[in-house]
Image (spheres, rainbow, N blue to C red):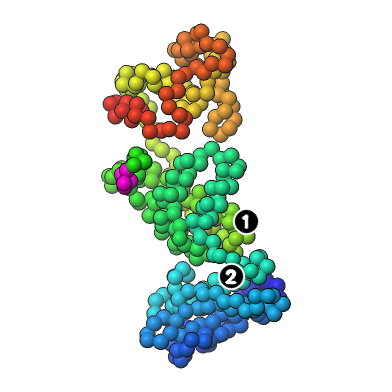
Amino acid sequence: MPYDGASSVARKTRDDRLDTRAARLKLAPRREPYWRNIQEGRAIGYRRAAGGKSGTWVARHYDPAAAAGRQYQALGAADDFMAGDGADTLTFAQAQERARAWFADLARSGGKVVAPLTVEAAMKDYVADYTARGGKALAPMQAGIDAHILPTLGKRQVADLTPAVIRAWLRGVATAPARLRTKASATAPKTRTVSAEDADAHRARRASANRLFTTLKAALNLAYREGKVATDDAWWRVQPFQKVDAATIRYLTDDEATRLVTASPADLRAMVIAALLTGCRYGELAALRPGDVDLAARMLTIRSSKGGAARHIVLTSEAAGFFQQLCHGKTTNDLLLRTPFKTSDTKHVGISTSMREL
């Protein structure tokens, strides 16, 4: 009989013996579960435990035409003595939902029992997909996954995720101290303590949590689209923090800009000046060539911005004079600015030292 996901999930099976903990605790302890059929060939069972321990839920699937015959799946502990949380402890209704998800997995896999998908496996699949699509932020994304997603959620099965579990994880990331960059040889990560009065720092932590949540959802959505999990309900119901992306903007004064240039290492000074005059990112400046500078029109062309599209920047007379000096003696294919470190390397000592000396 084919699995009808929509109608089955919406309609819960009732059983006077299993509906309530009071009714279940009246049953005699035994190894053979007390079974209740959900559909033809599909049943949910309750195994009553002895010694005052919580019972457990189990699902049974039977297809006489399949080679596997009867198949069983442990669902979780019953809410005999603790309230059902939908994750580790299940009510009768929650156990039915988990059983139906397993039946759906069997239907999609042609009746084969597949290993439950963990969050760690889902993240690994997503990183592989992201890499194949040419994603440009692989290193920082992987660092975020390793630091904030896998330690808390990695071993959990995706099917066991609930909105409450994901919300707790999101709040945990938002309230955790910000990590500082450390050497690869460091034995433990360093963190930065944030004052309770520093509203912008707390906003930034929530914004970081939202970015990690976006990565987590992208991985889980990929698993859902590929049929590896039965539903996306758990993460679809969780909302990110609102109105946290707009940072407090503070512009450097002329005196601060002068001090920054003076404190910059010699091999980075021209790059710092160009950034102050244009507002461009390091990667955009590192790719500039003489052909990108139109001195007559006082226009700088950024051929590939962060969003992928080209953009144009109007140069002041001071900026035009600076770029004229950079272009002097260079050929069309020469880079305008020296790049003392890679675009992806944000640990250059010159930047951190210069900013501290402001």
State the image coordinates of residue 256 (x, y, percent, origin top left): 32, 22
- For image coordinates 72% across by 77% down, the residue present is 65
40 relative to 198 in the view: left or right = right
Residue in the picture at 47% in, 62% down = 156
Circle 1: element type: helix
- Marking on residue 225: 1
Q: For residue 194, say whether it is visible.
A: no
Residue with the mark numbered 2: 102
Q: Type of residue at label 2?
A: Trp
| Camera-nearest residue between 137 and 208 | 137
Residue type highlighted by circle 1: Arg
Q: Position of residue 76 (x, y in %)?
A: 48, 74
Label 1–label 2 contact, CB within 8 A: no
Give the image location of residue 217, x and y in percent. Answer: 52, 53
Mark 1: few, some, or many residues within 10 Å (few <14, many ≥20)? Answer: few
- Dot 2 lies on which element? helix
The boundaries of the magenta stretch are: 186-191
Q: Does the magenta portion include 187?
A: yes
Magenta-drawn stretch, dominant element (helix, strand or loop): loop
Residue at 63% in and 60% down:
227
**Nearer-the-camera pick, 248 or 280:** 280
Q: Quadrant of the N terminus?
A: bottom right
10 Å crowding of disc 2: few (<14), some (14-19), many (20+)? many
